[in-house]
C-alpha cells in the first residue's frame, strides 16, 4: 500500500512538470517579438563631368590686334574636381590663357577662362587659326572648346564720304500742297573708310517730317555700299501757287577712329496745283518766297574723347544757305525751341528753351539760349559754348539737337532744327605703379620690379597685354596678359631687370586694351628707379708694417720703459728689446732681440758666508 502511494505521488509530480513546460506555458511568456530594421539607401555613385561653353566659337579681327574669348567652365558632376588646362593651335599665332594652370571646382561651381589670340601683323586677309582648349580632371572628366580666329582686311586709308546719288518724291509725279508723300533718298559711301553712326536730319518749313521727327539713323555704311532712306513728309499748305520747293537734309557720321563728318544736301521737289472746273481764269503768277536757312556746316570739341563728367567747349560753324537774311537769330542748345505766340505772324515775342533736352549735355556758364544776332545770306559765323557731360551718361553716340529761332525779311518768326552727333567714351582709370618701394638697384646685379596695375574706375575693365621695356637694361619676364579687372581690383607683375648703366633708369610700361567703340588703344606710363655704381674696393691695411719686407724702424721708448728694462737687468731678467727686423718669405714678421745700447753689465752681488 505504501509503495502504491509513492508511485501515485511520483506520477502526479511528473504530470505537473510536463504541464509547466508545455505549449500553453510558452504562450504566456513575455518574450518580445523581433522587429525588422530599415536599411538606409546606398549613396549615389560619384559623377565626374564638366561643361565648357565659349561666348563665341569664331571671331575675326584686323592684323596686329588681340581677340579675346570668354570660356565658362562648370562642374556638372557631384565631386570636387581639379582640372588641368591644355591647348593646341593650328597656326603659329601667339595666344594666352588665364588662368593657365590647374583649376579647382566644387560640385556645381563654375569659373571663367579668358583666352587671348594675337593676330600677327603679317597675317593675310582670310587666314585663320584654330585654337583647341582642353580641360582634363579627376575621374576622367574632360571638356574642350575649338576657337577659330580669322584675319580681316586692314582698314583702308582715307576717309568715308557719303553722297546723294538720286532721290524721288511720291510716285514720281508732282506734289500738291497739303499732300503726304514719301521722300526716297539713295545714298552711297564713295570714300575709302567705313562710315558709322549715320544720322539723317530733315529740316525746313515747306515740308514737315512725319513719324520720325525728321531724324533717321543708320549703323554703318561700308565703302562702295548703297542704301535707301525713306522719310514721310507733309507738304505745307503755304506752298499753294508755287511750282517748286526745297527741303534740306543734313548727314552726320563718323569714321572708325571717331572723326566726325557732316554733309548737307538740298532736295528740290516739283509742285502741282489741283485742277478745278468752271470758267477758265488767268493763271496767277507765283511769287518767290524768300526764306533764310541756317545749317551747322561744321563742329568740333576741344576735348577728345568726351567722358562722363568732362567739361568741354563745343565750337560751331553756322551758315545761312537761304535766300534772305536771318534776323535776331537765337540758338537753343538741346532743341525744343518754341515762340510765345506760335501764330507765324510778325511779332516781337521772345524765345523759350525750357523744353530742351539737356539730360546728357548741359550748358555751363550761361543758359541754353545763345543770341547770335543777324546772319546775312552766305555768311558763316562761329559760336563756342561750354558744356558738361552728365556723369550718369553711358558710352555711345548721342544726337544733340540745336534749334535756331529767327525772323525772316517780313518779320515772321521761324524755327530751324539741327542735329549733331557727339561720342561719349568711358576710358579705364588705371594706376600703374609699384606695390612696394623697389629700393636702390646695383649696376649689373639682377633685381625684381614690383609692378602693379589698379583699377580706380567704377566699372569692370578688360585689359590686354602689359609689357615693360627699358634702355640700358636687360628686362625679362616683362610681358603678361592682365585680363578682367573689377573696380578696385589689381594685377601684379614681378619683372627681372639687370641695369647696364648707373643713374636714373626709365622703365616704359605699355598696356593694351579696346575702348567702347571696339578700337584698340594703348596706355603708356614711365617709371624710374635709381641705379648705384659698384663701389671700388679699398686696399688691404698693412698694419704699419713695411711693404715688400725690410727692417722696421726702431720704436722710441718712453722713460718708464727704460726704467723697467733697467730693473729687469738688475734682477737678471734681461733688459734687451724685441723688434721686427725682417719679413719672412711666407709673409710673417720675424722678431729679433736687440741688445741694449750703452748699458753696463749687471753687477754681481756677492753674498758673504754666515758667521
Image (tube, helix red, strand yellow):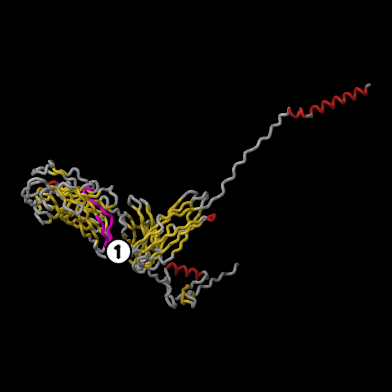
Q: Which residues are magenta?
A: 212-228
Q: Which residue is mark 1?
A: 155
Q: Quadrant of the N terminus?
A: top right
Q: Is residue 531 above or below residue 585?
A: above
Q: Quadrant of the C terminus?
A: bottom right
Residue 364 locus on image (x, y percent): 19, 48
Residue sitting farthest toward the front:
278
| Residue closest to the eye, 182 or 390 | 182
Residue 116 location, quadrant = bottom left
Q: Is residue 319 above or below residue 26?
A: below
Residue sitting farthest toward the right:
1
| Residue closest to the eye, 402 or 438 | 402
Drawn side of residue 455 relative to residue 269, left or right = right
- Dot 1, crowdedness within 10 Å: few (<14), some or many (≥20)? few
Residue 391 locus on image (x, y percent): 27, 48
Residue 419 locus on image (x, y percent): 20, 51
Drawn side of residue 188 relative to residue 176, left or right = right
Q: Is residue 383 visible?
A: no
| Residue closest to the eye, 72 or 344 | 344
Amino acid at each position: 500500500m505504501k509503495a502504491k502511494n509513492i508511485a501515485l505521488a511520483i506520477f502526479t509530480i511528473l504530470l505537473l512538470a510536463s504541464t509547466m513546460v508545455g505549449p500553453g506555458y510558452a504562450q504566456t511568456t513575455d518574450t518580445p517579438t523581433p522587429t525588422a530594421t530599415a536599411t538606409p539607401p546606398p549613396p549615389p555613385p560619384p559623377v565626374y563631368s564638366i561643361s565648357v561653353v565659349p561666348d563665341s566659337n569664331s571671331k575675326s579681327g584686323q592684323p596686329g590686334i588681340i581677340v579675346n574669348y570668354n570660356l565658362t567652365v562648370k562642374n556638372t558632376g557631384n565631386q570636387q574636381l581639379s582640372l588641368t588646362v591644355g591647348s593646341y593651335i593650328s597656326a603659329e599665332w601667339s595666344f594666352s590663357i588665364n588662368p593657365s594652370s590647374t583649376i579647382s571646382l566644387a560640385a556645381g561651381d563654375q569659373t571663367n577662362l579668358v583666352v587671348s589670340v594675337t593676330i600677327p601683323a603679317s597675317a593675310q586677309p582670310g587666314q585663320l587659326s584654330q585654337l583647341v582648349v582642353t580641360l582634363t580632371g579627376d575621374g576622367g572628366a574632360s571638356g574642350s572648346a575649338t576657337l577659330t580666329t580669322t584675319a580681316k582686311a586692314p582698314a583702308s586709308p582715307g576717309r568715308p564720304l557719303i553722297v546723294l546719288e538720286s532721290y524721288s518724291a511720291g510716285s514720281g509725279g508732282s506734289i500738291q500742297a497739303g499732300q503726304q508723300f514719301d521722300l526716297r533718298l539713295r545714298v552711297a559711301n564713295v570714300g575709302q573708310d567705313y562710315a558709322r553712326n549715320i544720322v539723317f536730319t530733315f529740316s525746313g518749313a515747306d515740308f514737315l517730317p512725319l513719324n520720325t521727327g525728321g531724324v533717321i539713323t543708320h549703323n554703318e555704311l561700308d565703302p562702295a555700299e548703297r542704301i535707301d532712306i525713306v522719310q514721310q513728309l507733309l507738304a505745307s499748305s503755304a506752298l499753294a501757287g508755287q511750282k517748286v520747293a526745297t527741303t534740306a537734309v543734313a548727314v552726320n557720321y563718323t569714321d572708325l577712329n571717331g572723326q566726325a563728318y557732316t554733309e548737307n544736301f538740298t532736295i528740290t521737289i516739283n509742285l502741282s496745283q489741283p485742277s478745278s472746273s468752271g470758267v477758265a481764269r488767268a493763271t496767277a503768277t507765283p511769287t518767290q518766297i524768300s526764306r533764310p536757312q541756317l545749317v551747322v556746316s561744321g563742329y568740333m570739341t576741344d576735348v577728345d574723347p568726351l567722358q562722363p563728367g568732362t567739361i568741354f567747349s563745343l565750337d560751331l560753324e553756322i551758315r545761312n544757305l537761304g535766300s534772305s537774311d536771318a534776323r535776331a537769330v537765337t540758338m537753343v542748345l538741346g532743341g525744343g525751341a518754341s515762340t510765345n505766340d506760335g501764330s507765324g505772324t510778325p511779332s516781337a515775342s521772345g524765345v523759350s528753351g525750357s523744353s530742351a533736352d539737356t539730360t546728357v549735355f548741359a550748358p555751363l556758364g550761361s543758359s541754353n539760349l545763345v543770341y547770335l544776332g543777324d546772319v546775312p545770306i552766305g555768311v558763316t559765323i562761329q559760336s563756342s559754348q561750354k558744356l558738361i557731360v552728365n556723369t550718369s551718361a553711358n558710352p555711345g553716340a548721342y544726337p544733340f539737337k540745336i534749334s535756331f529761332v529767327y525772323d525772316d525779311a517780313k518779320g515772321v518768326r521761324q524755327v530751324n532744327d539741327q542735329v549733331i552727333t557727339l561720342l561719349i567714351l568711358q576710358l579705364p582709370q588705371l594706376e600703374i605703379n609699384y606695390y612696394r618701394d623697389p629700393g636702390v638697384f646695383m649696376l649689373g646685379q639682377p633685381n625684381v620690379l614690383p609692378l602693379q596695375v589698379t583699377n580706380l574706375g567704377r566699372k569692370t575693365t578688360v585689359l590686354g597685354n602689359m609689357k615693360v621695356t627699358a634702355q640700358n637694361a636687360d628686362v625679362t619676364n616683362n610681358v603678361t596678359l592682365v585680363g578682367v579687372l573689377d573696380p578696385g581690383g589689381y594685377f601684379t607683375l614681378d619683372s627681372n631687370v639687370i641695369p647696364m648703366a648707373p643713374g636714373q633708369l626709365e622703365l616704359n610700361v605699355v598696356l593694351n586694351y579696346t575702348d567702347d567703340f571696339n578700337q584698340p588703344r594703348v596706355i603708356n606710363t614711365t617709371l624710374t628707379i635709381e641705379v648705384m655704381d659698384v663701389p671700388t674696393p679699398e686696399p688691404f691695411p698693412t698694419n704699419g708694417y713695411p711693404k715688400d719686407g725690410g727692417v722696421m724702424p726702431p720704436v722710441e721708448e718712453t722713460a718708464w720703459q727704460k726704467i723697467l728694462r733697467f730693473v729687469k737687468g738688475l734682477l737678471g731678467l734681461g733688459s734687451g728689446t724685441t723688434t721686427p727686423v725682417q719679413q719672412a718669405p711666407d709673409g710673417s714678421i720675424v722678431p729679433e732681440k736687440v741688445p741694449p745700447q750703452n748699458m753696463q753689465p749687471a753687477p754681481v752681488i756677492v753674498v758673504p758666508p754666515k758667521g
